[in-house]
């Protein structure tokens, strides 16, 4: 098991940016978040098997938020640092935690038996 904390990620709407030609790319806010995740996870063991993830989302304020909106930027940013590809996940649990100024996501990753 690997356990760590990350800053609250940008929303999906601010993580991605649509270009004039209609293509989509990671925004400057998204790139900044990805860089923070890379620095925070630098040197950690990379998991290569099937995965189970438990994510406790500690929101930054009491506004209404969709928990699933947090996952895309979070998983994309962790990819290549603690796991190879988010396709490795067979099970994902997302829980709403406390309100914490600035927000935070508590992450637990487990390698699980391959079901094939």
Image: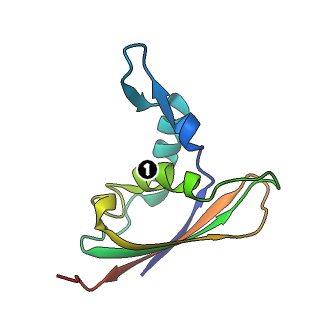
Asked whether 114 or 48 is in front, the reply is 114
Tell me what residue is drawn at x 61 percent, y 63 percent. Answer: 105
* Quadrant in which the N terminus is drawn: bottom left
Q: Quadrant of the C terminus?
A: bottom left
For image coordinates 41% across by 50% down, the residue present is: 76
In screen coordinates, is 10 left or right of 1?
right
Kind of element beneath mark 1? helix
Q: Residue furthest bottom?
A: 113
Left or right? Give the position of 19 relative to 105.
left
Q: Which residue does the image show at 46% across and 44% down from the upper left?
A: 34
The one of 23 and 111 positioned closer to us in this rendering: 23
> Colour scheme used in the picture?
rainbow
Name the residue: 29% across, 58% down.
85
The local crowd at label 1, few if under 14, some if 14 to 19, many if 20 or more residues have their Cα within 10 Å, is: many
Instruction: Name the residue beneath numbered marker 1.
Output: 77
Q: Give residue 78's quadrant in the image.
A: bottom left
Q: Position of residue 96 (x, y in %)?
A: 68, 68
Q: Residue 70, how many percent across, how many down?
A: 57, 54
Q: Point out residue 50 in the picture as x, y percentages from the top left corner.
A: 28, 75
> In the rendered image of this protein, does residue 52 appear above or below residue 32?
below
């Amino acid at each position: 098991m690997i356990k760590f904390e990350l800053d609250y990620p940008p929303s999906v709407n601010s993580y991605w940016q649509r270009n004039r030609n209609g293509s989509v790319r990671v925004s400057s806010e998204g790139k900044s978040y990805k860089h923070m995740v890379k620095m925070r996870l630098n040197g950690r063991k990379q998991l290569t098997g099937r995965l189970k993830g438990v994510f406790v989302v500690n929101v930054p304020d009491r506004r209404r938020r969709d928990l699933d909106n947090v996952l895309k930027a979070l998983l994309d940013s962790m990819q290549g640092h603690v796991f190879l590809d988010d396709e490795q996940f067979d099970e994902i649990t997302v829980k709403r935690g406390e309100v914490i100024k600035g927000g935070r996501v508590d992450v637990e990753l487990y390698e699980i038996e391959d079901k094939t």
